[in-house]
């Protein structure tokens, strides 16, 4: 079964390509390389033993996407990762985010319309804002988004639901990711931030290897066990496997229309706990300091994973130590073997 993976050379995309192959699917990768490196294709090949089909393509270009649908007619599922994702940048450049994240989605849905495809959408726990109840379930209200980036995820979920309500023959699953971290255990693929990392774990690993002087903990005066923010960190390989589970769910005869799942571990971990877990798992001491809060940060969020366990038949298996040690192995690999 051929699966189109947009953004397939990105962090989550590349790990999902590997898990698709492990599960017997045939990935067809699309990526515009705006936030990824073409050599990731060679890295994937080292893991799976062959180079998957790759189309360098801008999904915002309607003509190119129509051409793709002509050239790749026997696609049976789409996993749509391709999107911009930097929260801060989205506040500075909202139109860039709305244009990219919506045009790509709509072009893709239109190009493959009428083929009864299974469609997996990359959503985010950001749609919950600061939930009133924790752990947050899929039934919690979707808050008015805190950033244009978050808004693109929220509206995209609505676009997909409207499309299903109109009688479209797509089947759609939205996966609301919590915080993906870690890397493949081969250390051949991992997160590849361009410039200064915005996210916690790549900043930690770059500090540990000496690329950054120190890591700042954004606030220790929150109402949490140690005052730093709480997130639900999930190993990217577990997250990748959730996409395989979503495809399998949609392939079942009784699956209809649209569904949405939390993809986390169900556990909350503070920033300081992550720092100490990294030190414990790797034996490397981190130079860190406490700084002011980061604007727009949610105090605490972690997911209820009952629905994904029961209905999706998927559960995260890897713990924080695996996340930290694999992220560290990848950082060491990529520092010694720049792409
Ligand atoms: C956010 C969004 C997520 C989105 C992701 C994309 C929420 C709840 N989550 O993740 O949906 O997909 O951005 O980038 O809106 N931190 C530090 N020091 C650092 C970096 C981070 O203390 O140098 C802290 C942050 O304050 C936060 C935690 O680490 O508490 C995780 O931050 P980050 O990795 O940036 O992810 P989120 O902001 O949770």
Image (cartoon, rainbow, N blue to C red):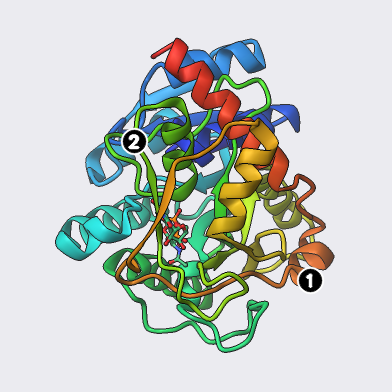
Residue 55, placed above or below residue 247: above
Asked whether mark 2 and ligand 1 are closer than 8 Å, the reply comes as: no
On-image quarter of the N terminus: top right
**C-alpha gap between disc 2 and disc 1:** 41 Å
Is residue 74 at least partly visible in the picture? yes
Q: Position of residue 99 (x, y in %)?
A: 21, 57
N-terminal-most mark, 2 or 1? 2
Q: Nearer the viewer, residue 76 or 215?
A: 215
Looking at the image, in which quadrant does ligand 1 appear?
bottom left
Q: Position of residue 90 (x, y in %)?
A: 24, 60
Structural crowding at the residue carrying mark 1, measured as other residues with C-alpha within 10 Å and reported as few (<14), some (14–19) or many (≥20): some
Residue 72, placed above or below residue 118: above
- The residue tagged 2 is 213
Residue 272, placed above or below residue 130: above
Q: Secondary structure at mark 1?
A: helix
On-image quarter of the C terminus: top left
Q: Position of residue 261 (x, y in %)?
A: 65, 66
- The residue tagged 1 is 306
């Amino acid at each position: 079964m051929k699966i189109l993976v947009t953004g397939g050379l990105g962090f989550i995309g590349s790990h999902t390509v590997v898990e698709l192959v492990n599960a017997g699917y045939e990935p067809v990768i699309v990526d515009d390389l705006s936030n990824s490196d073409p050599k990731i294709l060679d890295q994937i090949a080292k893991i799976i033993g062959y180079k998957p089909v790759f189309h360098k393509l801008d999904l915002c270009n309607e003509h190119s996407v129509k051409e793709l649908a002509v050239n790749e007619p026997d696609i049976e599922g789409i996993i749509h990762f391709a999107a911009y994702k930097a929260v801060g940048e989205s506040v500075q450049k909202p139109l860039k985010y709305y244009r990219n994240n919506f045009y790509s989605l709509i072009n893709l849905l239109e190009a493959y319309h009428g083929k009864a495809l299974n469609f997996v959408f990359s959503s985010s726990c950001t749609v919950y804002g600061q939930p009133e109840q924790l752990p947050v379930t899929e039934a919690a209200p979707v808050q008015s988004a805190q950033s244009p980036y978050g808004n693109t995820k929220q509206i995209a979920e609505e676009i997909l639901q409207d499309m299903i309500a109109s009688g479209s023959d797509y089947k759609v699953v939205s996966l609301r990711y919590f915080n993906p971290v870690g890397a493949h255990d081969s250390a051949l693929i991992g997160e590849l931030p361009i410039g200064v990392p915005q996210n916690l774990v790549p900043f930690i690993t770059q500090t540990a290897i000496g690329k950054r002087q120190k890591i700042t903990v954004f606030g220790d005066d929150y109402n949490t066990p140690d005052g730093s923010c709480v997130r639900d960190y999930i190993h990217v390989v577990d997250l990748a496997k959730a996409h395989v589970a979503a495809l399998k769910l949609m392939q079942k005869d009784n699956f209809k229309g649209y569904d949405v799942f939390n993809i986390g571990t169900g556990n909350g971990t503070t920033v300081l706990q992550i720092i100490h877990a990294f030190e414990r798992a790797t034996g490397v001491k981190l130079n860190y300091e406490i700084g002011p809060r980061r604007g727009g940060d949610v105090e605490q969020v972690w997911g209820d994973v009952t629905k994904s366990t029961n209905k999706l038949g998927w559960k995260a298996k890897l713990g924080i130590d695996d996340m930290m040690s694999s992220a560290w192995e990848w950082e060491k690999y990529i520092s010694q073997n720049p792409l």
